[in-house]
Every structure is written in C-alpha cells, then in structure tokens.
C-alpha cells in the first residue's frame, strides 16, 4: 500500500506537522507500507528532508493573495499528479493553503481515499484572525475536503472543538506517539534535577504559545528557587531581543534562552529540569508536553492545550484556564510552591500516563488499520468510523 503525505511548510522549524509526519512514516514502515511526502515549502533549502529520497520538496511562487496562497508550475503539477495517481491513499496535512486544494482535487480525480489532518487548523482560536476568509474557504471547499474523507485528529478534545467549524464529518482521534528512541532514552537516562529548579518552556517563539506572557509572569514571581529556561527557534513575530525585553533585569539570571536545540541537547535539558510550562492559545496535541511527561516531568499547561484531559486525569501537573498574563502568574504561584516530594509524585504520574497513552506500537497498529480499512473500502463510508458529535 503506497501512502502519500502532502503538506505545506513541513520543515522542522514549523514544529508539530513535521514531527507528526515523521511518526506516520515510521508507523507505515512497521507494516511495510511505502510512503512518499510532498512539501510545498517557501524555502526548500531550510528543510533537511530535501535530501531524503522519499520526500519531494517543491519551491513555490506567489499567487494572487501572496506567498501563503502560492502556485506551482504546470510541469510540476503534472509530475505531482502522477505521484497521486500511483498512490493508494492520500493524507493532507494543515489547511488554508494551495497544497490542500491541489491534493484533494487530484485524489478525487483518481478515486483515492483521502485523510485530512488539520493539526489544529479547525480550533476556535484560528478563527480569531482572518476569520471571514477562513470560513468562506471552508464553505467553498467543504464537500471537496470532507465528503467521504476521514478527518484524523490527535485528541478527542481537538475533534470536539473542530465540529463547530466543519459539522458532522467522518472522524477519528488517535494520540500521536513518542518514537521508540525517545522512549528508550527517557527510561534509561537518569534524572539529574539541578538547583535552582528549572522550569522549561520548549517551542517556537510565537505569540500563539504565550511565550512573552510566560516570561513576564515568571519574572513577577521573583522566586529565587526557580529558573526559567526557554528553548526554541525564533520566529518572525518574536525574537530573542523580544525575550530579553520581557525578562528585563532577570535576563541571563533567572531567565535563560538556550535557542533551538538538537534532540540530544533537549533530552539533557529534560533530565535536569523539574517541570515544563506551555500556556498556549491552542495546541491540538503538544508534542513537547507528551515528551516532557515521558521524561518524568510534571507539566503546567493551559486548558487550550488539548492534552489537558490526559494531564488532569493522570494527576500529571496543573491545568490552568488562561486568558491573560495574570492567569499564568496565578498558576505559577500555586505550582512553584510544590515540595520536591510533590514534584516527584507528579512526575511519576506523568511518566506512567505517557507510557500508556503515547505508545508507538499501539499507534502504528491503529494507524495502519485505518489506512487498510479506507483503501479496502475505496472511499466508501466505513461503518467502523463514527461521526463527530
């Protein structure tokens, strides 16, 4: 069974989608299903996947509405259409871009089963900006994208929130997993918490993640027993200079910026940390939350991180309703008073929940079963796939 993944900006600096596609690829390999990936990147040179034989990274040029609505040449379109025709199933990642319409039309033309993976693109938060354009886009292309397709969500919570935008469509939720290498290292590398205790923020420096609000709230705590370590690449919206301004006199003292780290360096940070914070406006999953939990770290997250249900049920940390910087401050004030024994108890609960919920082989089996069912049904409605409420 040949699987084709189509994405826009699936380079590592764009986070979740890139990591998720990697997990889908590994899961397919578990069942000997070949996979090819197409990415319509703004700058292919920044995507290391361009060197991989099963990736096609396509340069684009500006369309009538700018780079985000980019176009490709007719020759490239023909070549990529041939790729769709030779595939058994097409998975489209992310929404509101040219690649979505192109891939969906090709899949319909050649009668290929279609999976849509929104990666949070149907969360209510995304309609707080450019709402009219997005809602019009969804209305125009609703049948093309969602008729006889399967929408694959990372959590039940993501699926429930998305129903307001797309209605009653065929859908399934499946926790994204931890890859086996990460799980092995999380189980074998000893925890080495430091003094002062380290609170990690891991993620792209982007307003959606409330990173500046988190830094300011932490500085207002003035707790000498804790240090905030910020890890992640800069973005067009937030630079390291913006972080420095938010931290003020605490910069390079109680607030430290590590930049973007490779995996071994990040794992070393998990080993030495006492907790992780992510107060995002939206996260349809939150890979770093799951990863920190697997390393035995308690987490402080907003209710808008869709793993909040898992964290609450497991007693793996603190879930905070966040509307402002003051809400982050209140959550920190409660959490940072935790004793070492409290943190250890929360961390063990986090590790146990992550082992159960984010198991790779369980994911691989479920994912491949979904693919096989859709291909066997050749696009017909599958009884086993229930409707979103």
Image (spheres, grey):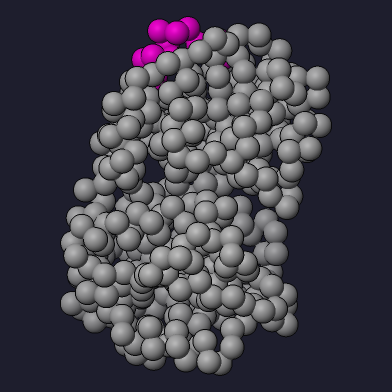
Say above or below: 109 vs 246: below
Q: Quadrant of the N terminus?
A: bottom left
Q: Is residue 272 shown to the viewer in this render?
A: yes
Position above or below: 231 against 204: above
* Horizontal relation, residue 314 to residue 104: left or right: left
Q: Say how many tags the image has.
A: 0
Question: What type of secondary structure mainly makes up the magenta span?
Answer: helix
Magenta-colored stretch includes residue 344 = yes
Q: Residue at x 47, y 43 (%)?
A: 286
The residue drawn where x is 44% and y is 52% is: 19
Image x and y of residue 158, in percent: 45, 52
Quadrant of res 34: bottom left
Q: Position of residue 39 (x, y in %)?
A: 50, 70
* In-image side of 132 versus 184 (left or right): right
Taking the image as shown, residue 256 lies to the left or right of residue 6, namely right
Q: Is residue 367 left or right of residue 135?
A: left
Q: Position of residue 238 (x, y in %)?
A: 73, 45
Q: Please give the range of residues in magenta.
A: 336-347
State the residue lying farthest toward the front.
Answer: 51
Measuring 19% from the left and 65% from the top, which residue is drawn there? 32
Residue 96 at least partly seen: no
Q: Looking at the rendering, which quadrant does residue 170 occupy? A: bottom left
The residue sitting at 67% across, 64% down in the picture is 131
- Quadrant assignment, res 313: top left
Q: Is residue 181 above or below residue 268?
A: below
């Amino acid at each position: 069974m040949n699987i084709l993944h189509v994405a826009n900006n699936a380079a590592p600096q764009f986070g979740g989608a890139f990591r998720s596609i990697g997990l889908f690829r590994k899961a397919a390999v578990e069942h000997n299903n070949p996979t090819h990936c197409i990415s319509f990147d703004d700058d292919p040179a920044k995507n290391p996947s361009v060197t991989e034989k099963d990736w096609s990274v396509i340069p684009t040029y500006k369309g009538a509405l700018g780079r985000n609505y980019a176009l490709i040449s007719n020759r490239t379109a023909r070549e990529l259409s041939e790729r769709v025709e030779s595939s058994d199933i097409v998975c489209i990642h992310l929404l509101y871009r040219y690649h979505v319409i192109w891939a969906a039309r090709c899949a319909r033309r050649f009668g290929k089963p279609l999976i849509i993976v929104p990666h949070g693109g149907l969360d209510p938060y995304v309609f707080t900006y450019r709402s009219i354009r997005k809602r019009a886009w969804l209305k125009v292309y609703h049948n093309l994208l969602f008729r006889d397709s399967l929408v694959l969500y990372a959590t039940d919570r993501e699926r429930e929130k998305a129903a307001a935008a797309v209605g009653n469509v065929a859908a399934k939720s499946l926790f994204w997993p931890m890859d086996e290498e990460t799980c092995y290292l999380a189980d074998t590398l000893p925890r080495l918490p430091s003094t002062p205790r380290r609170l990690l923020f891991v993620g792209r420096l982007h307003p959606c993640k409330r990173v500046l609000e988190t830094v300011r709230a932490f500085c207002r705590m003035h707790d000498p027993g804790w240090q905030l370590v910020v890890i992640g690449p800069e973005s067009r919206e937030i630079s390291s200079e913006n972080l420095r301004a938010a931290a003020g006199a605490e910069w390079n003292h109680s607030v430290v910026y590590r930049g973007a780290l490779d995996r071994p360096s990040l794992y070393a940070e998990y080993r030495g940390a006492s907790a992780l914070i992510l107060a995002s406006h939206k996260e349809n999953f939150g890979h770093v939350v799951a990863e920190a939990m697997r390393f035995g770290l308690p987490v402080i997250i907003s209710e808008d991180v869709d793993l909040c249900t898992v964290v609450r049920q497991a007693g793996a940390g603190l879930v905070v309703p966040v509307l402002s910087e003051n809400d982050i401050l209140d959550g920190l004030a409660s959490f940072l008073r935790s004793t070492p024994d409290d943190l250890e108890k929360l961390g063990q609960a986090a590790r146990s929940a992550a082992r159960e919920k984010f198991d790779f082989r369980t994911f691989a089996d479920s994912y491949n079963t979904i693919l096989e069912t859709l291909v066997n049904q050749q696009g017909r409605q599958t009884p086993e796939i229930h409707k979103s409420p």
